[in-house]
Amino acid sequence: MTGKIKKNLTTELEETLMREIMLGIHTPGGTFPSELESVKRFQVSRVTVRRAYAKLEEKGILIRNRRCNTVVNDRLFATAEPISMVGALLPLQQTFSNRFLACLNDEAAAEKALIVLAPPFASGRELELAAMDMVLHGVRNLVVWCGDHEVDMQIFRRLRLLGINLVFFDLVNPGEVADFVSLDNRHAVESLLEKALQDGFRKFAFLNTADLRADSNLERENVFENFCRERKLEFSIHTLPWKKMLADGAAEECRTVYQAVPEPDKTAFFCVNQFVARSVCNAVGGQGCYYMISIPEDEVLPRSRCVIQPISEMAKECFQSLRRQQNAGRRWKAAEVRLKGCPDWL
């Protein structure tokens, strides 16, 4: 328990034990080491251990049962503490981040709370470590953006068992461990399909990503397929290599998919996001007609229609979610909020 910044022994011990709980070393519902065991292990006084345990018990992380054993909390709950800091774990290099952050900061200012930014992360593991570090520094409210399911959701489940308020937004649905704020994907995709029908198209192709496991992408594909089947429309579904598109545009793969579609000039291409649409459009020289879900102020593609994600409203709803969790405390249950996007042709 050493570090560059000198802390008192009680705080050091508390943080060490919290990190072990977050890492799953001490399992939820399992018996926690006795005070005497921790005295021997860490070579500190009984008073120091007792104080650290008392702090963890006060936060609801440890529970004393009738047999005087100490166990790790195994019930998901939210902290009822006032919102003083909000940790923002999102990709700062993404174009929507500035608008999202500005709105989130406005909401925090009204609450007289501070926004704490996570360092840039390039993987799910880096995101997990950033979340744990924030918690160890006293942040009790986290707004999280996950790019895909590479993140270990058990880490966030254990954060919830520590009473940390969590809200995920945009791509990955966390299930029971956190609130979820997202675009209403059914409304978005069906609006685009209805517009394509009005534009005279009767053939449709959906372009998804092969190596990006995001719940929103799967939802959009399912809505597309169900709509086409119900209307008995001619359709096909294709995938493109996401990581290669990010690296170099995947022009060859994009051209191959485009050429595999019968009569591409008479087909409406539904792209899972604007990056896929841009990659295909660039690869085939602006040919085709593209329908996509976009972000505000994104570049306009030739012959394209899009539903624009309500980024500012999503940020406001994320903060409202933290307020609801604070009010719910130990009665908290995960909730979903779906916001309708704005069609660019209205």
Image (spheres, rainbow, N blue to C red):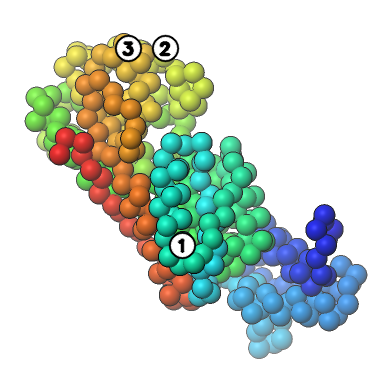
Q: Residue at x 28, y 14 (%)?
A: 286
* Circle 2/circle 1 CB separation < 8 Å: no
Counting residues from the N terminus, which is met first, the one under dot 2 or under dot 3?
A: 2
Where is residue 293 drawn, in percent x and y?
30, 36
Counting residues from the N terminus, which is met first, the one under dot 1 or under dot 3?
A: 1
Horizontally, residue 331 falls left or right of residue 114, namely left
Per the image, the residue denoted by label 3 is 284
Q: Residue 63: tell me if it is visible.
A: no
Horizontally, residue 108 falls left or right of residue 122, namely left
Where is residue 294 drawn, in percent x and y?
32, 35
Question: For residue 227, which quarter of the picture?
Answer: top left
* Circle 2/circle 3 CB separation < 8 Å: no
- From the viewer's side, name the closer residue of 175 and 296: 296
- Amino acid under label 3? Val
Q: Nearer the viewer, mark 2 or mark 1?
A: 1
Per the image, the residue denoted by label 2 is 252
Which numbered marker is on residue 1? none
Question: Does residue 217 sit above or below 291 in this rendering?
Answer: below
Per the image, the residue denoted by label 1 is 109
Distance between the Cα atoms at labels 1 and 3? 47 Å
Find numbered disc 3 in the image and state the secondary structure of the residue it sits on: loop
Q: How crowded is mark 1: few (under 14 residues within 10 Å), some or many (20 or more)?
A: few
- Amino acid under label 1? Ala
Q: Which residue is drawn at 38% across and 28% down?
A: 275
